[in-house]
Amino acid sequence: MKWKTLRHNGVAFPPDYDYRGRTVQIKGEPFKLDPLQEEMLMAWAKKKDTPYVLDSVFQQNFLGDLKKILPERFAGITLADIDWTELHAIADRDKTANLAPEEKKKRSEERKALREELKAKHGAALIDDIETEIGAYLVEPPGILMGRGAHPLRGKWKARVQPEAVTLNLDEAAPVPPAPDGHQWGKIVHEHNSMWIASWYDELSAKRKYVWLADSSHLRQERDKEKYLKASKLESGLERVRAKIREGMDHRDARIPKLEKEERKLQEVVQKGETAIHQATAKGDTAAVKRMEDELAKLRIELERSGKQRETGCAVQMKKRQIATVCYLIDRLAMRVGDEKDEDEADTVGASTLRVEHVTIDADRIEFDFLGKDSVQWQKFLPATDGEAILARNLQDFMQGKQPGEQIFHQIGSTHVNRFLGEIVPGLTAKVFRTYHATTTVRKALKEKDGQLPNAPAFEKEYTAKLANLQAAITCNHKRTPPKNWEENLAKKEKALEQLKAARSENTKFAKEIENRETALKKLSEEQAKFAAEGPRLVRAKETALAELQQAPTAEDEKEIAKLEKQRAAAAQALEKAKEDFEKKTARLRERVAKARETLETAKQAPQKAEEDYQERLAKAQRQLELAKQTRDYNLGTSLKNYIDPRVYKAWGDYVGFEWKRLYTKALQRKFAWVNQSRAKWSPSGEIHAEADDQLEDHNVEVEAEALADE
């Protein structure tokens, strides 16, 4: 997945702050703000109605950065020393909610036009002459870092990124896009193995940040597909991998006992030699002392060599045990490796970076408790049973003599872990385990219900699929802080459910409708019966009239003859019309009676159908409420986007009759466009047979074209 050519127009930058030259009172002193000071204070003023401003860490972090740009005389101020009256008033006036509808519409249209203009210029790159969508092409704007969970940096100021800090990734012959007026790019590089187009160093987090190709780009899709294929192949070699991990956790170097025995013997000989030297010295035998000291020096060198060999062996043994133990945690608890990150993720604490303070070993359980990705608490327990005895022993060994803040696995990192795993199964890395566990969790959860679902309503299938997604989120510890309006939204769902229960249709209205339909049918049937009796009489009367005219004696007068013939023709015509009218009305009445019977039957079935529809709407509302409660603390989107093999949902959906795309946003559908080509099949055992996908023809260009067309 190495590109040859990469061309693009650089990245877009947020507009400069609209400086208004405000003056505020700080400790009673009027102080005119410069642009950065005003920008920071206005950003804080706009947070006045949020819970963030009540957070002491948020306050202190913001205040600390604010003091850095204020004069020295304000070094001891608090936020309460600033008069926010005018700034709060400006923030209130600027709120979109306070604008007139016409102004809201105007601003919305202006923002849309600007977005379209920026997208036209910066939204795509040419990779090997294929137009490829770029993800977030706008550099992060300055502002207050909100953070997630108990983020230690929440409240600090994110500085404005200037073009001079930005590195662009282009091919060697590519024209360098112009930087914004008055600026120049920091650096131009040519990293053909990378899928980013721009990067910069973030001083606040002390990490590099990147602008990536969009998930729908052909290179990202190929990498995604490769990731899921690796995870599916892990299963066949999983027992071998686990056996090697167990073996490594209990690794013992056979040379160490021999070296220890040799070292003890040498120590005994040295001690005896030292005693002999003391005795010879006491006797004044200098020649013997000199000879024994020379021999003792050689023994000490040998003892030191033996000790170093033993220490080296112990260190290697300890390192192998640490590597295997980290691998065990990654597999057993779906823990992140720690010092390795996905290309679009922040660094995080994980297995290899656990500290002593993160682990507690009691008589009955092993507890892991730390802040993981995005400062979200990661807490899980393992029973201290025989099955976990090696783990408990190793952790105790690795923590012995260390302080709470020291790393447990101080000798290793992700490189060692991935090298160890790759020696067992080529290409296997720590990340593959999380993909495997998330996918396996979903597959097992879906299997438990698939036999009950082919005839179930679509909402029940969707509920089952999302519960499986939730299990994967729990496995991967994808926790979240519930949205601030979560309780409000839940209350709305509960109220809607109660209203639905109270709105159950009464059978009385159906009974009245049936009665009306029966009356209408009876009336039509009577009309039909009456006409069936009267209609033939009318026809027979016409037949009789015609017969009488036909039997009348023929007159001799030509005028009388003509008159009789005219009467006979009229009678014959009247008879034909009577027959035609009879047939038409008979058919019409028959049709009306049949329709009335059908309407009556529909009315009779209406109570049952209404009850079925009501029960389905009620069940759907209940499922939505249950799902809202169960997913309160978990983010389903992370595992759905990054860890669950989408071919599982597609194969399962094909099996139970559910459109798998309903689970994915439009953006994720573009990301997983390659899944449409998958031939994976769901089997009754809950397995998916995806081997055929290994031979899928390359369809990068088609997928890319479809993704851009969707845009």
Image (cartoon, rainbow, N blue to C red):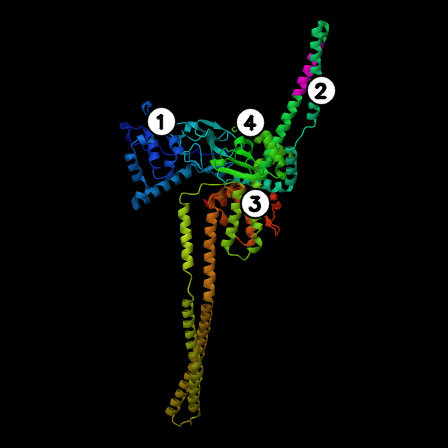
Picture coordinates of residue 411 (x, y %)? Answer: 58, 27
User: What residue lies at 35% left-to-right and 34% top-to-bottom?
Assistant: 44
The residue labelled by disc 2 is 265
Q: Residues within 10 Å of mark 2 (few under 14, many from 20)?
A: few
Mark 4 lies on a secondary structure that is loop
Mark 3 lies on a secondary structure that is helix
- Whichever of callouts 2 and 3 sits on the residue coming sooner in the sequence is 2
On residue 660, which mark appears?
Answer: none
Mark 2 lies on a secondary structure that is helix
Marks 3 and 1: CB-CB under 8 Å? Answer: no
Q: Residues within 10 Å of mark 4 (few under 14, many from 20)?
A: few
Marks 2 and 3: CB-CB under 8 Å? Answer: no
How far apart are the alpha carbons under marks 2 and 4? 31 Å
Residue 631 part of the magenta segment? no
Residue range corresponding to the magenta coloring: 292-307
- Whichever of callouts 4 and 1 sits on the residue coming sooner in the sequence is 1
Q: Residue 329, relative to residue 305: is it above or below?
A: below
Amino acid type assigned to the residue bearing label 2 in the image: Lys
The residue labelled by disc 4 is 402
Q: Nearer the viewer, residue 97 or 104?
A: 97
Amino acid type assigned to the residue bearing label 1 in the image: Lys
